[in-house]
Image (cartoon, rainbow, N blue to C red):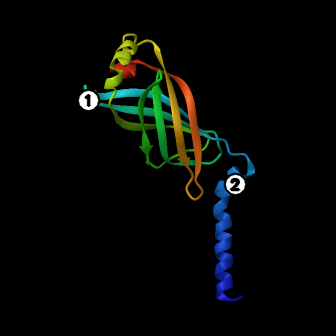
């Protein structure tokens, strides 16, 4: 056997072994992770700019660790655009578990001041949110999970109470 043949066979074998981590995608056993907006916390706010922390929970229902490569997002509160953007943080979610992910954002909600003050008059009330975007997962073979989720969050984090 020539050296070239040996190298090609070795590369082929290593490639096949490397694909076993993605086997759940090809066999149909892969389930998309669930992403929920858990909390919106005001860090600092003034008339021109608000610094917030978006806290997400990412649940991995699969039997293998889930590498996350980033998140593209758009978040609306009660039909008002809160923020949108792209984060490129890398982290992993262990098999059959969940992780919290905190994303610092800056926004300007001046145009929504009237609606926000109306919402914050009742901090015990839940606020509807809509999360759209993509969660980028995988390392060698990426898999983008489309996010289109609605839910409710507690208004107390927004009012700083």
Tell whether 96 sits left or right of 87: right
Numbered disc 1: secondary structure: loop
Residue 132 at x, y percent in the picture: 52, 35
Pointer 2 or 1: first along the chain: 2
* Residue plotted at (35% across, 31% down): 52
* Residue plotted at (67% across, 82% down): 6
Residue 50 at x, y percent in the picture: 30, 30
Q: Quadrant of the N terminus?
A: bottom right
Residue 126 at x, y percent in the picture: 48, 16
Q: Quadrant of the C terminus?
A: top left
Graded by Cα atoms within 10 Å as few (under 14), some (14 to 19) or many (20 or more), the crowding at tag 1 reads: few
- Direction bottom: furthest residue: 2
Graded by Cα atoms within 10 Å as few (under 14), some (14 to 19) or many (20 or more), the crowding at tag 2 reads: few
Q: Do the residues labelled 2 and 1 touch (CB within 8 Å)?
A: no
- Give me the disc on residue 23: 2
In this view, the mark in front (2 or 1): 1
* Residue plotted at (68% across, 71% down): 13
**How many numbered marks appear?**
2
Q: Distance between the residues labelled 2 and 1?
A: 49 Å
* 52, 84: nearer the viewer: 84
* 62, 85: nearer the viewer: 85
Residue 35 sits in quarter: top right
Residue behind mark 1: 48
Numbered disc 2: secondary structure: helix
* Residue plotted at (63% across, 41% down): 32
Q: Eyeballing the image, is 118 above or below 160?
A: above
Residue 153 at x, y percent in the picture: 47, 22
Tell whether 15 sits left or right of 124: right
């Amino acid at each position: 056997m020539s050296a070239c043949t040996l190298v090609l066979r070795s590369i082929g074998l290593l490639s096949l072994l490397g694909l076993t981590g993605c086997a759940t995608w090809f066999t149909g056993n892969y389930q998309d992770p669930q992403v929920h907006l858990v909390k919106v916390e005001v860090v600092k706010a003034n008339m021109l700019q608000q610094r917030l922390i978006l806290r997400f929970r990412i649940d991995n229902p699969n039997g293998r660790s889930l590498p996350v490569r980033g998140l593209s997002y758009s978040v609306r509160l009660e039909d008002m655009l809160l923020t949108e953007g792209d984060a490129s943080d890398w982290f992993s979610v262990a098999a059959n578990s969940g992780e919290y992910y905190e994303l610092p954002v800056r926004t300007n909600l001046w145009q929504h001041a009237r609606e926000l003050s109306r919402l914050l008059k009742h901090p015990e009330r839940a606020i509807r949110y809509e999360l759209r975007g993509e969660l980028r997962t995988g390392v060698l073979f990426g898999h983008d999970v489309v996010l289109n989720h609605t839910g409710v969050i507690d208004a107390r984090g927004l009012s700083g109470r």
